[in-house]
Image (cartoon, rainbow, N blue to C red):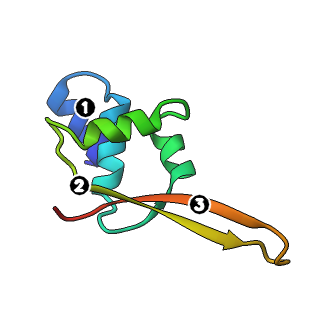
Amino acid sequence: MDRRRRLQAAQGASVSLVARLAAFLQDRPDQWIDGRILGDVGGCYAWRTRLSQLRRPPWNLHIENRIRRIRSADGRRLFVRSEYRLGRP
């Protein structure tokens, strides 16, 4: 049974977007994930708030973030990518 279904079975209801985001990160420890992907998983309008909630009780997850500047293939543009990962406390 996948993590989402286990969460649903344990809660007896549908999974909140916070729980969905937690499960997504827990399935990918120490893996940097683009913030745009987290927006798809945790809801595009409030995923940063949900990520912040995961850093506090009852979740207490150790979530790290980094900012990378990436040059386009033609070298003309510089993009900023915000990435997050579930690290070890």
Q: Residue at label 2?
A: 62
Circle 3 crowding by C-alpha within 10 Å: few under 14, some 14–19, many from 20: some
Q: Amino acid at mark 2?
A: His
Q: At 45% from the left edge and 37% from the top edge, which residue is drawn?
A: 47
- Where on the picture, by quarter, is residue 70? bottom right
- Please indicate whether residue 25 sits to the left or right of residue 78 in the image: left
Question: Residue 80 or 43: which is nearer the viewer?
Answer: 80
Of marks 2 and 3, which one's residue comes earlier in the chain? 2
Q: Position of residue 76 (x, y in %)?
A: 85, 72
Q: Quick one: SS at disc 2? A: loop
* Distance of label 1 from label 2 (alpha carbons): 23 Å
Discs 3/1, front: 3
Q: Residue at label 1?
A: 8
Label 2 close to label 3 by CB (< 8 Å): no
Of marks 1 and 2, which one's residue comes earlier in the chain? 1
Q: Residue at label 3?
A: 81
Q: Position of residue 26 (x, y in %)?
A: 27, 55
Of marks 3 and 1, which one's residue comes earlier in the chain? 1
Q: Amino acid at mark 3?
A: Arg
Label 3 close to label 1 by CB (< 8 Å): no
Q: At 25% from the left edge and 31% from the top edge, which residue is drawn?
A: 8
Question: Residue 16 or 59: which is nearer the viewer?
Answer: 59
Q: At 16% from the left edge and 61% from the top edge, which residue is drawn?
A: 89
Q: Amino acid at mark 1?
A: Gln
* Distance of label 3 from label 1 (alpha carbons): 32 Å
- Please indicate whether residue 85 sits to the left or right of residue 78 in the image: left
Q: Quick one: SS at disc 3? A: strand
